[in-house]
Amino acid sequence: MPTPDPAAGGQASAVSVRAILRLALPSSAVFLMATIMGLVMIRFASALGPDAVAAVNAGTRLYNVFIALCAGISAGTLALVSNAWGAGQREEASRLLQLSLLMALALGALLSVLSAAAVPALIDAFGLAAEANAEAVGYSRWLSMFFAPMAFCLVLTVGLRSAGDVRTPVMLALLINAGWLLLAWRWSTHPPLGLEPHVRWIALGMGLGHVPGAVLAYALWKRHRLVLGPVKTDLGDGRRLRALLYTGYPSALEQALLQFGVIAFIGITGRYGTAAFAAYGTGISLLSLAMVIGVGFSMAVSVLVGQQLGAGSPENARLAAMRALKLCVIVLGVPGIVLALNAGPVALWLTGDAEIARLTVVAIYAFTAVLPMLAVEFCIGGALRGAGDTRFPLLNVLAGLFVVRFGLAWLLSRAGFSIEWIYATLVADYSVKSALLLWRFRSGRWTHARVRKK
């Protein structure tokens, strides 16, 4: 069984830079692996043509909607489990994780069924050409078949991180990504049963790659080989379920709105042609190499804030957020700047198309400009979620993404501005969101939000 976090056990302790990095860096490594796999999928698809690249980018956006809905369970799991762990209530933390895993499996199975019918309509929102649209539908449908094991692994690793176990999620990610890479690589050029190469085989390889990891994760959890294991249900499980839903649903709405807002925004880019659409999606995937570091910091801040509030130390919770923010601004900027300096050659190598590569470079420059503001969104937003204040980040997405970014992009596109101006609306979006998050954090209201116990 992994060694429990010595900082968590019912007593507040000062939050050091080392404690932040101990949680942030392994989480960043896991998200980095997933991001690299996403880029590899684009690379595999590029051998099948621009329509396949557009299909992978569109499918990735819908996959992110699935992740967004899982975020509702994950956010409740993180806030409640870390709070219970910080208060020294380890059996309570195990009960909360067990309920979260059941919810994850149910949600994954439901979304797999719904996706079979809904994917064509969602893909139509991108405004792709007929061939690219057809390939995107096939890619997304095959991938959606594996949502249940994906959701189980996602929620389990969130629960383990909330209890201070950062090693097991890394090991599971290595196994999952190895299977994913092997199958997707093999089937992108040599499909099973001698069938014709098609982008759908990449999705099938990605999905099947998750199965061994999910089976191993379940076995370890079931046999009490993890820091949190199965427990007998009791009469309080209904209360815990309500608490998970109450704390998590704003994050689910936030992430779902975020993804649908991005889809709507990308729909505007799609009206400028396949090259503009593919370039924006590729630019997001490329910059994710820097952004995943911020996601790791966000996870670390959420866990530390939840643990410190559970241990009764809001001052240490505040300290954790501010120290993480300073670190994140520095660490996040380095890979972003390196990528921006080499954007041209990297974009051309990845896409294999001169026009897509040219526009990808523009998208990368826009993203690089907002990296400091992304650090605020990751760290301060993570602090609010770890405290159980999951409603303000939801309002923040509505203000920044829908009102500012989408609103500006729609007006600029109607006025005939070029695609470069559409990409630039990201700067306005993140400027507004980071300012609102800092205002909320300085108000101190989030320290009183806590998580709902009943």
Image: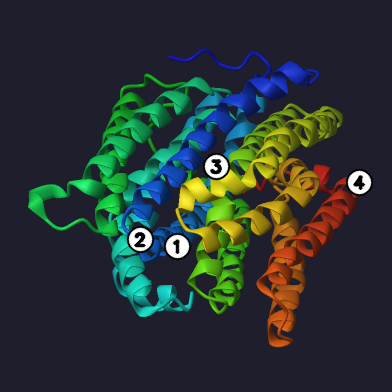
| Mark sitting on residue 330 | none
Disc 1 designates what residue? 62
Residue 22 picture quarter: top right
Q: Earlier in the sequence, mark 3 or mark 4?
A: 3
Q: CA distance from mark 3 to mark 4?
A: 25 Å
Residue 166 picture quarter: top right
- Above or below — where is 416 with respect to 337? below
Total marks drawn?
A: 4
Identify the element where label 4 is drawn: helix
Local packing at callout 1 (Cα closer than 10 Å; few below 14, some 14-19, many 20+) is many
* Callout in the foreground (3, 4): 4
Q: CA distance from mark 3 to mark 1?
A: 23 Å
Q: Taking the image as drawn, is residue 238 in sight?
A: no
Residue visible at 28% across and 35% down in the picture: 182
Q: CA distance from mark 4 to mark 2?
A: 50 Å
Q: Taking the image as drawn, is residue 66 in sight?
A: yes
* Callout in the foreground (2, 3): 2
Left or right of 241, for residue 21: right
* Callout in the foreground (4, 2): 2
Disc 4 designates what residue? 442
Identify the element where label 1 is drawn: helix
Residue visible at 52% across and 59% down in the picture: 354
* Callout in the foreground (3, 1): 1
Q: Earlier in the sequence, mark 2 or mark 1?
A: 2
Q: CA distance from mark 2 to mark 3?
A: 41 Å
Check disc 1 and give the amino acid type. Answer: Leu
